[in-house]
Amino acid sequence: MRKYSKLIRKGIFEPLPNVQFHGKAPLKRFLLLDSKLAPNSNMRVAAHIITKLPKRIPKYCQLHYHKFDEINLILSEKGKLKYRVCLEDEEYTVSSPATVYIPKGMRHSQEVISGHGIFVVILMAKKYKALI
Ligand SMILES: [Zn+2]
């Protein structure tokens, strides 16, 4: 084993309903980084892969908040992936490519509306904990 190989990790398939206040969604979620995958990491990273969406998308994310900052990356070609992002009492339609910065304590939810691409969630915390 090489010196730094433990810093390179395979993503782990982990369905969204395993995440507090999230339900079944038409996407594939991979946990890419947490303190189990890399013991000294103080961040969590997950990617949601959106390929083909059904006509009707069920609601799958409840408004919640964290005691740490969250960053979302909405990645695809220009305008090819759209998310509904709720920040407190305001609702936004956000098109790729875009970043959403959610300061700690701000209630939020994010749900895919249309298209294809990758939704990346970066949490500035060792452990996931959400509150409503
Ligand atoms: Zn969140």
Image (tube, grey):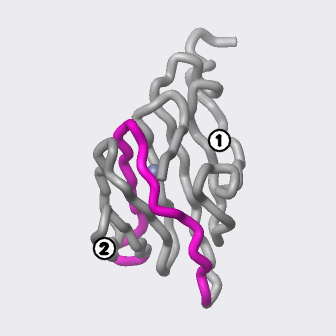
Q: Can you name the residue that lies furthest to the top here?
A: 3
Residue placed most toward the observer, 54 or 89: 89
- Percent across and percent down for residue 88 are 31, 62
Q: Can you name the residue that lies furthest to the bottom here?
A: 55
Q: Is residue 93 left or right of residue 31?
A: left
- Mark 1 packing: few (<14 Cα in 10 Å), some, or many (20+)? some
Residue drawn at the location 28% of the way across and 71% of the way down: 90
**Quarter of the view holding residue 83:** bottom left
Residue placed most toward the observer, 131 or 74: 131
Residue wearing tag 2: 92
Quadrant assignment for the N terminus: top right
Q: Secondary structure at mark 2?
A: strand
Q: Earlier in the sequence, mark 1 or mark 2?
A: 1
- The magenta segment is 56-80
Residue wearing tag 1: 11
Amino acid of disc 1: Gly
Residue placed most toward the observer, 117 or 85: 85
Q: Is residue 19 left or right of residue 61?
A: right
**Quarter of the view holding residue 23:** bottom right
Asked if the stretch drawn in magenta spans residue 66, the answer is: yes
